[in-house]
Image (spheres, rainbow, N blue to C red):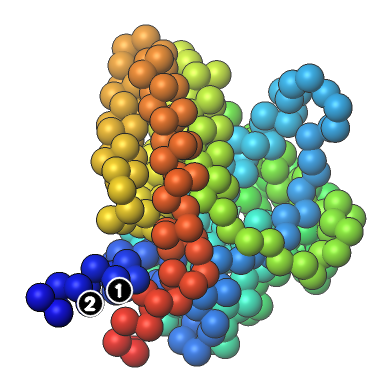
Amino acid sequence: MLAVAACVSAPEAVAPIDRDSLRELRWVAPGADAVAALTTRPVACAAKDAAGKESRSELDWQRERGRLAFESPALLGGAAARMGLSCASCHLNGRGNVNFFVEGVSGAPGTADVTSSLFSKVRGNGTFDPVPIPDLAARDGTQIRDRKSAAFREKVRGLIVEEFDGQPPPPDVFEAVLVYLDSLDVAHCADPSARTALEPFDDYGAAFSAMTAMVTQKGRPDAVLFYSRAARERLERLHERFAGRGDVPAQLEALSASLAQAATARDGGMPTVAIAEFSALAVALLNEAPKSLYTPEVLRAALEKQPPR
Ligand code: HEC
C-alpha cells in the first residue's frame, strides 16, 4: 500500500533517452552542455517577411521552402541522411554549431571534415582535415560572397550531390535553397551572438509550411514527394520529444500517414482531413509541451538517466 501511495505522488516518470530515441544526440559533442545544445540555437539572421503585409510574397515562400530543405535530411544522401543529418545540423539556423561532433568527421567540437569518405563517395580525400563550420550569415573567411553568382550555384550543387551524396534536388527545391542562403546575413540580426529557445511550434510550423509547399507544388510529383518527406521528418522530431505524452504520438503518426498518402495520391491535393489533424495537433502540443523534451528540465532529467558514454 505504501509503495503504491509513493508512486502516485512521485513526479511523472521520465523515460531515459539515447541516440536512437533522440537523433540530435548523435552529433552533440561529448562534454558539451547537452541540454543547452538541444533546446537552444544561434539566432536566425535571415531576411524576414516584410512587416505589415497581408500575405507572404512568392519570394518569402521561396525562402521558407529553401529553409525547409536546408533543415531536412531529404536534401542529403548516403551516411549523412541515414544519420538524420541535414545542412542545418552543422549550420544551425544557417549559422554555425559549436557543439557539432561526429566521430571520424570532427576534430574539435564545431569542426567537420567535409571531404570525409564517410559522407562522400566522390570527394572523400582520405585525409582527416576538419575545419571550423562557418557561420553562413557572416559570409567571412573563404566563403563566396556573391550568392547570386554561377560559382556559388555550382558550390551548393557540389555540396549536395558530391559532398553529401545527395540526389540532384527537384529544380524548385534547389532554387529555393539558393534564395534561402542568399537571405542569410548578420546585418539582419540586432545581436548575432544571441541564442533562441527551440520550441515545439518551430517543428510544427515547419511541418505545416512543408505541407503548404506540397499543395503549391501540385503537379510536380518529385517536389511534392520532397516536401512530404520534409514535413514528415519534422513530425518525427516532435514524436521523439513527445514520446509517451498523452495522445500526441498517435496524432503525429496519423498525420504522417495522411501526408504520405497525399504525396502519392494522383491528384496531389491535400485532404481536408490533414488540415483538421494539424489543428487538433496544435491543441494537444500546447497541453503536453511542459512535459515534453523541449522543456529543459524534463530533458535534463531524461539525460541524467542515460549511462555516460
Ligand atoms: C558535417 C557538417 C556540415 C554539413 C552537414 C554541411 N556543411 Fe556546409 N560547411 C561545413 C564546413 C566545415 C564548411 C567549411 C569548409 C568548406 O567551405 O568546404 C562549410 C561551408 C559551407 C558553405 C560556404 C561555402 C563557400 O565557399 O561559400 C556553404 C554555402 C555551405 N557550407 C552550405 C551547406 C549546405 C547547403 C549544406 C547542405 C547541403 C551544408 N553546408 C551541409 C560543414 C557542413
Q: Quadrant of residue 301?
A: bottom left
The secondary element bearing badge 2 is classed as helix
Q: Does the residue labelled 2 lie within 8 Å of ligand 1?
A: no
Question: What amino acid does circle 1 point to?
Answer: Ala
Rendered residue at 42%/59% (across/down): 292
In the rendered image, the vertical position of residue 56 relative to residue 253, given as above or below: above
Q: Write down which quadrant ligand 1 falls in.
A: bottom right
Rendered residue at 38%/64% (across/down): 23
In the rendered image, the vertical position of residue 131 relative to residue 162, given as above or below: below
In the rendered image, the vertical position of residue 133 relative to residue 217, given as above or below: below
Residue 281 image offset from top left, x and y in percent = 42, 36
Query: Is the residue under label 1 in contact with that under label 2 (CB below 8 Å)?
Result: yes
Question: What amino acid does circle 2 point to?
Answer: Ala
Rendered residue at 41%/30% (across/down): 280
Q: Which residue lies furthest to the top in this view?
A: 267
Judging by the rendered image, the residue that carries numbered circle 1 is 10
Cα–Cα gap, marks 2 and 1 = 6 Å
Q: Does the residue labelled 1 lie within 8 Å of ligand 1?
A: no
Q: How crowded is mark 2: few (under 14 residues within 10 Å), some or many (20 or more)?
A: few
The secondary element bearing badge 1 is classed as loop
Q: In which quarter of the image is residue 122?
A: bottom left
- Which of the pair 77/35 is nearer the observer? 35
Asked if residue 71 can be seen in this view, the reply is no
Judging by the rendered image, the residue that carries numbered circle 2 is 6
